[in-house]
Image (tube, helix red, strand yellow):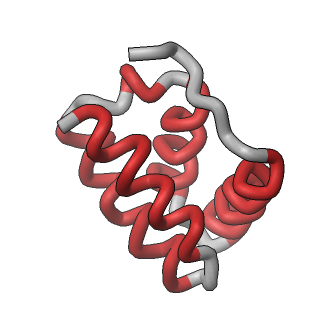
Amino acid sequence: MPSRVHIPARLHTHIRIVCDMMLKTHYFDEAHWLWMGVGSPQLCQTPGAQRALHSARTVAAEFGFPDVASWIESNVLQAVD
């Protein structure tokens, strides 16, 4: 598995926005593991990381970023299953 994932610029911007929104609304674990999924997806294999990423996917969709939610599902969660 590559240590870094190629992410289109617009999606990368959306991920940054979602992380910032998560931090402002106290979704600290979700923001942390979402950002880890960008830089080091191989580290997202622990049960705690998986729980946080499932939650991050839901929160991203609720925040109005379905592209981020889909990216989490297809590029982070499925990559470690």
Residue 64's spot in the image, x, y percent?
62, 84
Question: For the point 25% across and 42% down, which residue is it?
Answer: 48
Q: Quadrant of residue 67?
A: bottom right
Residue 11's spot in the image, x, y percent?
71, 55
- Vertically, is 23 above or below 74? below
Does residue 54 appear to the left or right of 26 in the view shown? Answer: left
- Vertically, is 62 above or below 68? below
Does residue 50 appear to the left or right of 47 in the view shown? Answer: right
- Vertically, is 55 above or below 81? below
Residue 76's spot in the image, x, y percent?
39, 42
Question: For the point 54% across and 43% down, which residue is it?
Answer: 32
Question: For the point 53% across and 33% down, which residue is it?
Answer: 36
Position of the C terminus, as image quadrant, is top left
Q: Quadrant of residue 75?
A: top left
- Vertically, is 31 above or below 69? above
Tag count in the figure? 0
Does residue 73 appear to the left or right of 23 in the view shown? Answer: left
Position of the N terminus, as image quadrant, is top left
Question: For the point 23% across and 31% down, which residue is it?
Answer: 46
Q: Nearer the viewer, residue 28 or 58?
A: 58
